Image (cartoon, helix red, strand yellow):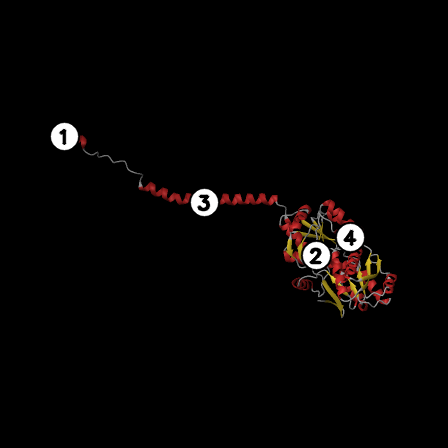
Amino acid sequence: MEPSIQNRTLSQPSTSLPEQPLSPLNDSGNEKKKPIRSFILSVLILFLLIVTTYIIFSLVSQKKPHVSNIKVGVMMPFTGGSSTMGYGTMKGIQLAKKQLGADNIEVIQMDSKCDPKTAAEVVKSLIEQRVAAIIGEGCSSASVAALPAANNAKIPMISPSASSPTLSIPNDYFFRVVPPDTFQGEFMAQAIFDKGHKTVAVFYTNEPYGSGMNKVFREKFEALGGKVVATATGEPDVINLESQMRELKEANPQAVFFAPNSVISGTAAIKLGREVGLTAPFFGADIFYDNTIISNAPNATDTLTITSFPTGTKPFKQALINEYRVAEQLYAASQAYDALHAIYIATERGARNGEEIKRELPSISFEGVSARIMFDANGEISDKNYKYDLLQIKGGAFTALD
């Protein structure tokens, strides 16, 4: 049965528009806005990252002390009979600062004159200036006098040349980049004995370095089978030593060993020794490594044989010549270079004061320009393979001996 017309009319499809999706015009607008929104979001994220990084960097910078505030005192003799120590030391320190790029270290230089009383006052002045470490003193007697104040203030002293055994003290604030005189005294005793000299006379200055060197030298020389037939002593910088030299001459030694702690006393002793008739070969300790003794006593010092702390590697020696236009090597320059190098390494590890530097030094080890630097329990170099230089004056100049 067919449906009615009315029914058919009602069942026809509606002529109204069906529900449509969003217009194509609206879709296109949204697609164009999406890249703009992404760009703006990226810019905002980048800006936030920059701001955050800047804030973090600022906070870290505030917490870390500025490295240029690290002060290192140099307490050495720059005047008087041992002034060559100070001169050589400063050249080594200046070269170290340049080559290491140690711009974080400010050097404060003071003259302690190799004098105990002066050194005791100078160390207090450096402490008042808030140094974090001290290079010096070069002389043992002055180091002994300055050490109590340094220990009390917890400021490490690193000496380039003070070698008295009296300074071999565990767990204090004294360090040195050279062995104690027990090494050097034994080395010279062996060298003299090996040259066939079986009797020897000794002159030394009356202070820790000289008396310590005399003791060690005597013990080693006599242990080898030799004999010390006479000893004489004088105060540092004293030049009236004629009676002492006559005393040595009367013993008729096969060799004479001089262990003063002053170029002035050393030069006077050698000159007067020759004048009173001492003809035996002369040997001397490291203080004699100074061209002024040649110019002041050219005849007396001819053929003088000395032992010295290492004068440095060949590259170091050449760098000194290139930098300062001087042909002669400088006393304690290589040791001072290594002393500053050790302090610099400590600061690179984060040490900023005396206690922190002292804490770092025992763990530091490196091949220095003077020797391998590695401190033992007494704060000194105790490498059994440590090598001294043996030099002789020939033709008005120091010549290395094999």
Query: Label 3 to label 2, Cα distance in Å?
Result: 56 Å
Compare marks 3 and 4 and give the one earlier in the sequence. Answer: 3
The residue carrying pointer 1 sits among few (fewer than 14), some (14 to 19) or many (20 or more) residues within 10 Å by Cα, namely few
Compare marks 3 and 2 and give the one earlier in the sequence. Answer: 3
Q: Quadrant of residue 250?
A: bottom right
The kind of residue tagged 4 is Ala
Q: Nearer the viewer, mark 2 or mark 1?
A: 2
Which residue: 50% across, 44% down? 49
Q: In this view of the protein, can residue 93 be seen by the observer? A: no
The kind of residue tagged 1 is Ile
- Residue topped by disc 1: 5
Compare marks 3 and 1 and give the one earlier in the sequence. Answer: 1
- Residue topped by disc 2: 336
Is 349 positioned to the left or the right of 153 in the image?
left
- Residue topped by disc 4: 142
- Which residue occupies the foreground of this view, 337 or 15? 337
Q: Secondary structure at mark 1?
A: helix
